[in-house]
Amino acid sequence: MTSKPKIVFISYSHDSTEHRRMVLRLSERLRADGLETRLDQYVNGTPVNGWARWMLDQLDEASRVVVVCTETYYRHFRGHELQQTGKGVDWEGARISQEIYDAGSRTKKFVPVLFDPSLAQFIPEPLRQYSHYVLTSEAGYQRLYDELMEQGGVEPHAIGAPKVKKRPRGKPLEFVDSSGSAVENMAGHEADLIPYSHVEDWRSIPLPTPLPQGKASSQATSALVIGIAGVICCSLAAPFAWYLANRELRLISTGQSAVAGQGVAQAARILGLVGMALLVLSLIWILFAGGLPFLQAMAANAGR
């Protein structure tokens, strides 16, 4: 038993005689390929119920609607054209927009078609969410035909059986008692017990060497003394105090010097920074702030 052919309504504007002829040829090709197209050019005179109801009936009965988009069609669709002409497209555009709106934009009924790829800008906005087809070649027509017949795309391969593999499992933790024998795992994995020969007795592990605790080293004390001198009387000594203090702190952090000298070394480093700051300020004063003439004047007064 042959199935009933799909009904396809073609919506277009009467741009020119040549354009009407192209639309008719498209309709004839679709009919030759088994689709029942509905076109105003097939009507003898005027429909019994008038053109407005005829268009509504075609939109309701059609399973798909081919929309041939041109600049004129777009203007009529949007209602930008004079109402003396093209009332059919204006009417169809309003009905198409309403149907898409009522469907929440979830419909594939409407298919935009172009005879010229440069006219893509004139696809009405409600239809731009759908794929459009350019009829400039046989391949383009076949893509449109497959869309209307709902036979586009590629048939997916059947889903086969999943390939499942076992996941790796870890071994449970085992302990050794004081007698040297392995304690049985509560989970019952006797085969996975750790041999005692591979487990070190905790009593044989050496304790970490404690850090020296005595008094501050001579280097820390020297750094502090030099730092005090760098602040009070000789700023040139400040960099040496800062260097010795940093060196002492590194030795303390590696356990090579007494922890008791940490506070002394930190104080020496601060004094070294302060002394270096005073040294920099002194140099700036001497070189740029008039300090050199002042020192020369003092030296001259002392020589008299």
Image (cartoon, rainbow, N blue to C red):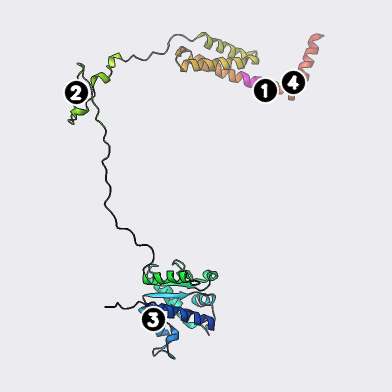
Q: Is residue 285 left or right of residue 139?
A: right
Q: Earlier in the sequence, mark 3 or mark 1?
A: 3
For the residues labelled 3 and 2, the Cα–Cα distance comes to 86 Å
Q: Which labelled disc corresponds to residue 281?
A: 1
Q: How many marks?
A: 4
Dividing the picture into quadrants, the one containing residue 61 is bottom left
Question: At label 3, which amino acid type do we have?
Answer: Gln
Bin the neighbour count of mark 1 within 10 Å (Cα to Cα): few under 14, some 14-19, many 20 and up: few
Q: Earlier in the sequence, mark 4 or mark 3?
A: 3
Q: Are marks 3 and 2 in contact (CB under 8 Å)?
A: no
Q: Position of residue 185 (x, y in %)?
A: 19, 27
Q: Nearer the viewer, mark 4 or mark 3?
A: 3
Bin the neighbour count of mark 4 within 10 Å (Cα to Cα): few under 14, some 14-19, many 20 and up: some
Q: Are marks 2 and 1 in contact (CB under 8 Å)?
A: no
The residue singled out by tag 4 in the image is 291
Q: Position of residue 284 (x, y in %)?
A: 70, 23
The residue singled out by tag 3 in the image is 58
Spot the residue most to the right: 304
For the residues labelled 3 and 1, the Cα–Cα distance comes to 95 Å
Q: Residue at x 61, y 12 (%)?
A: 229
For the residues labelled 4 and 1, the Cα–Cα distance comes to 11 Å
Q: Is residue 108 left or right of residue 163?
A: right
The residue singled out by tag 2 in the image is 183
Q: Is residue 14 above or below residue 266?
A: below
The reply to whether residue 195 is visible in this rendering is: yes
Q: Which labelled disc corresponds to residue 86?
A: none
Q: Residue at x 52, y 8 (%)?
A: 218
Q: Is residue 37 above or below residue 280?
A: below
Question: At label 2, which amino acid type do we have?
Answer: Val
Q: Residue at x 69, y 20 (%)?
A: 282
**Does dot 2 land on a helix, a strand or a loop?**
loop
